[in-house]
Image (tube, grey):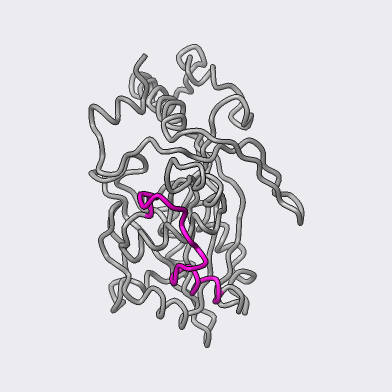
Amino acid sequence: MRTTGSAIRYLDRPALFENRASYRLLSADLRDDSPQLGFGLGTYSDKLDASEAAAHELAAVERSGPADEVPDWSALPLRGLIGDPFDLRRRAVMPAIETLTLRRQRETGRATFLLHWRDPTKVATAAGIYGLIPAGEFQPSSVASWDTKNDFDLWRNMVREYSEELLGEPERDGSQGVPIQYDEWPFYGSLEKARSQSKVNAYCLGIGLDTLTLTATLLTAVVIDDDVFDDIFGNTVQINAEGALVTAIESTSVSEGVPFTEETVKRMLTSEPMASPGACILARSWQFRDHILSR
């Protein structure tokens, strides 16, 4: 039986497409001061086979029927099989991690954020729209058993994405045959030192479930003081393996991003094509801006 993942791979494969091992979300409780997430293992195709197939099924029904008519469940047999989208044991839920990266000016408290346009020729999902950066699947760096354990950490996953998407560094794919030595990686060490000094602060805003594809995303925000940001990300690339970074017209550097202001946030949420996880993160971060930008 052919699957959605197989169809993408053999019929219209984007530049970035690997059926890698992924961490499967089995339980989640973020309601109190002791948040807990439970994980197992799966593959990236496990995610695509359910999510993308369900999205295409609904899109096909919408195109063939009246625009203002809610599709009948009888026309959505695959969606019916999925059942309760919040039942994490009924289907394979492989969460991505998307991050709003805020560059905070120490003197003023104002901030800018990084915006990314996803190139349709390079990515398998969320193509041709804006998203936040970094963003990526929560997965080990390779199929090796030691990487499955060594990379099982949300922050480590985010740092790997930072190095690839902002600095243009090669993907750390475990091809060297040994686990990534995070404590000996200068880039990781610089971020860890800044975190210990409260110059880098990471926040989890919740878990979002896309209404079309039913995919899950860990919604995060990272606030970085301007001096640390400029030191670590001063050579941010404009074009990366998944698309291009967007900058304000008046900016002199791609790494300066766009203003984190009510005007910009409103425009991105109402007038621009933006992926739902990034839109949710942006809206919630603006809602809680006084807390996450406090010094």
Query: Which residue of the protein is positioned furthest toward the front in this rendering?
Result: 177
Among the 4 quarters of the image, the one containing residue 143? top left
Foreground residue among 117 and 122: 122
Exactly how many numbered labels are in the figure? 0
Q: In the image, residue 64 lies at what x, y percent?
A: 34, 19
Nearest the viewer among 7 and 55 is 7
Residue occupying image coordinates x 45% and y 30%: 51
Segment tinted magenta in the rendering: 172-194
Q: Position of residue 265 (x, y in %)?
A: 46, 62
* Residue at 48%, 57% in the rendered image: 158
Residue nearest the viewer, comparing 216 with 111:
216
Which residue is rendered at x = 41% and y = 59% of the image? 267
Q: Is 178 contained in the magenta span?
A: yes
Q: 40 left or right of 147?
A: right
In this picture, residue 108 sits left or right of residue 44: right
Q: Quadrant of residue 85?
A: top right
Looking at the image, is 64 positioned above or below residue 19? above
Q: Position of residue 150 (x, y in %)?
A: 54, 51
Q: Quadrant of the C terminus?
A: bottom right
Vertical side of 189 occupied by 78: above or below:
above
- Seen in the image, is 283 located left or right of residue 65? right
| In the image, residue 241 above or below residue 4 | below
Residue 1, percent from left and from top:
37, 14
Residue at image point 49% right, 81% down: 105
| 212 in magenta | no
Q: Residue furthest bottom?
A: 107
